[in-house]
């Protein structure tokens, strides 16, 4: 005993030689991180942009306004709900206790309230450092309570995840945390509140296929491992190995499975900007006093308007959106593996008020046809339903050569996608305005133009079929058929298909893009202001009546008289044609080619 004491005493008295401190280096490129402000502030390599892991506390510090975080539900715990068997040293209970001491967290999920850019939010962080960020009973309860608290206080939810999925040591109880969190999210959704989710490295497993993909907007950090399957399982299933960059946030963005990849230094500003857009109180009365613009009809032949609507320098939907909005966050894909470039969708600020924009992007030149595939219609439907749920007005910009008629599109569900998009427009709870900005062709245009108000730029056309295609079936050339189809903006106005036309500068929108966008913006602000003044129930009834009564029909008596009169006219016309034919035939007997009697 005396020997042990003396050894301990000698150990205390002996001067400790501190090991030489090695400079920190990047795990990816090996760069020296000493003195790097980017690394010190965000744990990001200044040389290659590699994102190091952040603890839950560090994550909250980088995202939230200083001093605003208040943790909730820290006491919620369920250390070993199944009494999972194992040796005393390596038991599940011991592991949880060790993780609590090591990470200074009580569970993988940390939830609370805070502010981002001055916007109050309910925030949650799932930390991979605590048992791989796996979701068990306690973490599931905390996240469910966070969404319920946000619903009761009418606050958005911002969730940052780094998780490996379900905690297996809690068995089926852990698996059932998926629906436990989902029902709380659904209650939050019914209140018309946004849910934003940030994916960090790694995010896999059941959490990805559950509450993460129920988010309205998905943002990921660069080069994060993201997806349902673990990387090991993917590598085992791939016979020839995984392609470079597979299963990363960039690959998911390319396939339309997430909406954006944002580097950590810009993440807080991106979230604050999104919350600004989604704050419906800002500019709620914007545009109330907007004056109606001067409507000037340009008397041009129909075929000439068709050519102008297809002009290679005519502004595209992307350009109109960029010029009309002061901020715009683009949504990517339909979450089914494809991001159709023929559709642009997102949330933008129009005259101080947030709105969902869906535009048909018609390329001028290049290899892209601009034909819209099933993924494009599903992306549009996703954006329309998001606007409806959040109470944001929906603005669609229509300019397309049509829906993709290929066999691949057919087998991918083109018909169902078009129908779903049209149904979303007709059932949207929020105000909807559609604008035919160029050539609106057939079902592809109709599916996104079934709105409360429909506008047309002066030189735009709205077709049941392209005049060239119609001319191949009907008599006459494309120019003649175009006149007969009644496809110009003035024809559509007279038929009651559209409500107003929007003037274009000079010889057309292609001559002055800025002025064309300004004229359209004023028209949109005016129409949205009128729609906001209508009660929602009345607006939906008016929408129903509008499309229920498109095209005039006759009752039983008037219809019977109309049919008989039409048949009589047809017979009289036929008799007249026959008599005229006989007269010309007799005349031909005594006349030469010049019509002079022989």
Image (cartoon, rainbow, N blue to C red):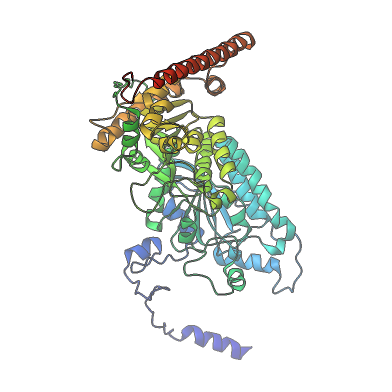
Residue 379 x %, y %:
50, 45
Q: Camera-side residue: 443 or 576?
A: 576
* Residue 240 appears in view: yes
Left or right: 580, with 413 as reference point:
left
Position of the N terminus by quadrant: bottom right
When asked about the image quadrant of residue 509, the answer is: top left
Q: In the depicted view, which residue is nearer to us: 266 or 140?
A: 266
92 is higher (above) or lower (below) than 436? below
Q: Residue furthest bottom?
A: 3
Q: Is residue 560 above or below residue 427?
A: above
Residue 42 in the image: x percent, y percent? 39, 61
**Spot occupied by residue 434 in the image (x, y as percentages of width and height):** 44, 31
- In the rendered view, does 4 fall on the left or right side of 369? right
Residue 335 makes an appearance in the image: no
**In-front residue for pair 139/366:** 366
Q: Residue at x 54, y 35 (%)?
A: 422
Horizontally, residue 126 falls left or right of residue 361, namely right
Residue furthest to the front = 598
């Amino acid at each position: 005993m005396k020997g042990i004491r003396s050894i301990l005493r000698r150990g205390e008295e002996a001067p400790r030689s501190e090991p030489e401190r090695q400079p920190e280096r990047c795990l990816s490129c090996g760069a020296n991180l000493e003195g790097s402000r980017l690394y010190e502030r965000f744990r990001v390599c200044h040389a290659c942009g590699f994102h190091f892991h952040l603890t839950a506390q560090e994550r909250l510090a980088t995202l939230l306004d200083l001093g605003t975080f208040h943790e909730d539900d820290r006491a919620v715990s369920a250390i070993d709900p199944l009494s999972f068997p194992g040796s005393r040293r390596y038991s599940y209970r011991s592991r949880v206790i060790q993780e609590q001491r090591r990470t200074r967290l009580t569970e993988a999920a940390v939830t609370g309230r805070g502010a981002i850019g001055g916007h109050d939010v309910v925030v949650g962080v799932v930390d991979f450092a605590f048992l791989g960020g796996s979701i068990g009973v306690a973490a599931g309860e905390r996240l469910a309570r966070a969404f319920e608290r946000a619903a009761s206080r009418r606050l958005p939810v911002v969730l940052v995840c780094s998780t490996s999925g379900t905690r297996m040591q809690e068995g089926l109880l852990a698996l059932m945390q998926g629906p436990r969190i989902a029902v709380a999210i659904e209650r939050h959704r019914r209140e018309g509140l946004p849910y934003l989710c940030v994916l960090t490295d790694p995010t896999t497993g059941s959490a990805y296929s559950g509450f993460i993909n129920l988010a309205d907007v998905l943002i990921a950090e660069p080069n994060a491992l993201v997806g349902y399957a673990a990387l090991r399982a993917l590598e085992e299933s791939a016979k020839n190995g995984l392609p470079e960059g597979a299963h990363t946030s960039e690959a998911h963005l390319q396939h339309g499975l997430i909406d954006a990849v944002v580097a950590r230094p810009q993440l807080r500003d991106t979230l604050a900007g999104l919350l600004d857009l989604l704050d419906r109180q800002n500019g709620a009365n914007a545009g109330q006093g907007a004056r109606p613009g001067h409507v000037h009809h340009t008397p041009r032949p129909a075929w000439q308007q068709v050519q102008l609507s297809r002009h290679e320098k005519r502004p595209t939907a992307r350009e109109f959106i960029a010029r009309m909005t002061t901020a715009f966050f683009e949504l990517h894909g339909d979450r089914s593996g494809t991001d159709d470039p023929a559709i642009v969708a997102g949330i933008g600020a129009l005259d101080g008020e947030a709105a969902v924009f869906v535009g048909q992007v018609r390329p001028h030149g290049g290899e892209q046809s601009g034909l819209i595939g099933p993924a494009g219609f599903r992306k549009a439907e996703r954006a329309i339903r998001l606007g409806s749920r959040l109470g944001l007005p929906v603005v669609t910009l229509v300019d397309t050569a049509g829906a993709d008629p290929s066999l691949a599109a057919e087998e991918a569900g083109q018909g169902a996608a078009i129908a779903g998009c049209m149904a979303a427009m007709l059932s949207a709870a929020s105000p909807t305005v559609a604008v035919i900005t160029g050539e609106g062709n057939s079902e592809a245009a109709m599916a996104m133009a079934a709105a409360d108000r429909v506008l047309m730029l002066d030189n735009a056309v709205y077709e049941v079929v392209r005049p060239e295609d119609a001319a191949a079936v009907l008599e006459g050339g494309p120019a003649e058929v175009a006149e007969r189809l009644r496809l110009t903006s003035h024809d559509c106005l007279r038929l009651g298909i559209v409500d107003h036309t929007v003037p274009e500068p000079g010889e057309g929108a292609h001559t002055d893009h800025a002025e064309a966008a300004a004229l359209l913006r004023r028209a949109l602000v005016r129409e949205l202001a009128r729609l906001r003044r209508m009660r929602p129930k009345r607006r939906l009834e008016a929408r129903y009546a509008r499309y229920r009564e498109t095209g005039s029909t006759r009752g039983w008596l008037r219809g019977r008289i109309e049919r008989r009169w039409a048949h009589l006219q047809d017979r009289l016309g036929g008799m007249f044609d026959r008599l005229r034919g006989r007269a010309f035939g007799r005349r031909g007997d005594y006349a030469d080619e010049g019509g002079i009697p022989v």
